[in-house]
């Protein structure tokens, strides 16, 4: 069984290192990236099965980047992570676009469950009737 390639984009170094450690312990192949801008460059060079993406980052927010990912790489699944879900517009957009979401802080078990559910869910960008 091939292991899934996962890219984690977050401006928090602790989150990046924690995600990498947790996911690699379950044999996922993990690349970490500290900014949305760098993430865009990485995504153009390599295909990922899943991108874990923070919403609030300098330069480009995660919702904008998730839209670009879905447009340019329709087979790539996205899992949004954030500790800042106060603006209703974020939560409404996530529900509207049928994106998976994990609230920070999360436990290793919560991360692994969310990743497994996102990877095994319907193909990316398919409408749910």
Image: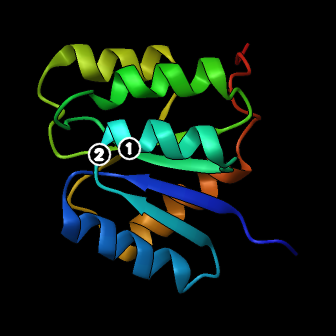
Q: Residue at x 33, y 15 (%)?
A: 92
60 and 106: which is toward the camera:
60
Q: CA separation, marks 1 and 2?
A: 5 Å
Q: Residue furthest bottom?
A: 25
Furthest-right residue in this view: 1
Instruction: Please report the residue visible at 63 percent of the width from the left and 45 percent of the height from the top.
Output: 45
For residue 93, what is the image quadrant? top left
Residue 46 in percent (x, y) is at 66, 49
Q: Which residue is mark 2?
A: 35
Q: Which residue is mark 1?
A: 38
The dot on residue 2 is: none
- Image quarter of the N terminus: bottom right
| Pointer 1 with pointer 2, Cβ within 8 A | yes
Q: Secondary structure at mark 1?
A: helix
The residue located at (77%, 34%) in the rendering is: 123
Asked if residue 71 can be seen in this view, the reply is yes
Question: With 4 as the anchor, is 103 left or right in this view?
Answer: left
Counting from the top left corner in percent of width and height, residue 103 is at: 28, 49
| Of the pair 21 and 37, the residue shown nearer to us | 37
Q: Position of residue 91 (x, y in %)?
A: 29, 23
Q: Position of residue 126 (x, y in %)?
A: 74, 21
**Total labels drawn:** 2
Q: Secondary structure at mark 2?
A: loop
Mark 2 crowdedness (10 Å alpha carbons): few <14, some 14-19, many ≥20 = many
Going by the image, does 24 lie left or right of 109? right
- Asked whether residue 101 appears in the rendered view, the answer is no
On screen, residue 101 above or below 69 = below
**Image position of 49 with respect to 106: above or below:** above
Label 1: few (<14), some (14–19) or many (≥20) C-alpha neighbours in 10 Å? few
Closer to us: 66 or 102: 66
Q: Quadrant of the C terminus?
A: top right
- Who's the residue at 53% across and 39% down the image? 78
């Amino acid at each position: 069984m091939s292991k899934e390639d996962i890219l984690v984009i977050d401006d928090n170094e602790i989150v990046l290192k924690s995600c990498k450690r947790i996911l690699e312990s379950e044999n996922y192949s993990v690349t970490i990236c500290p900014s949305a801008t760098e993430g865009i460059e990485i995504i153009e060079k390599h295909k990922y099965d899943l991108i874990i993406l923070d919403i609030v980052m300098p330069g480009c927010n995660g919702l904008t980047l998730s839209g670009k990912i879905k447009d340019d790489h329709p087979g790539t699944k996205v899992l949004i992570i954030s500790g800042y879900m106060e603006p209703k517009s974020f939560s409404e957009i996530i529900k509207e676009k049928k994106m998976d979401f994990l609230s920070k802080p999360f436990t290793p078990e919560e991360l692994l469950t969310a990743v497994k559910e996102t990877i095994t869910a319907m193909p990316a960008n398919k409408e749910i009737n």
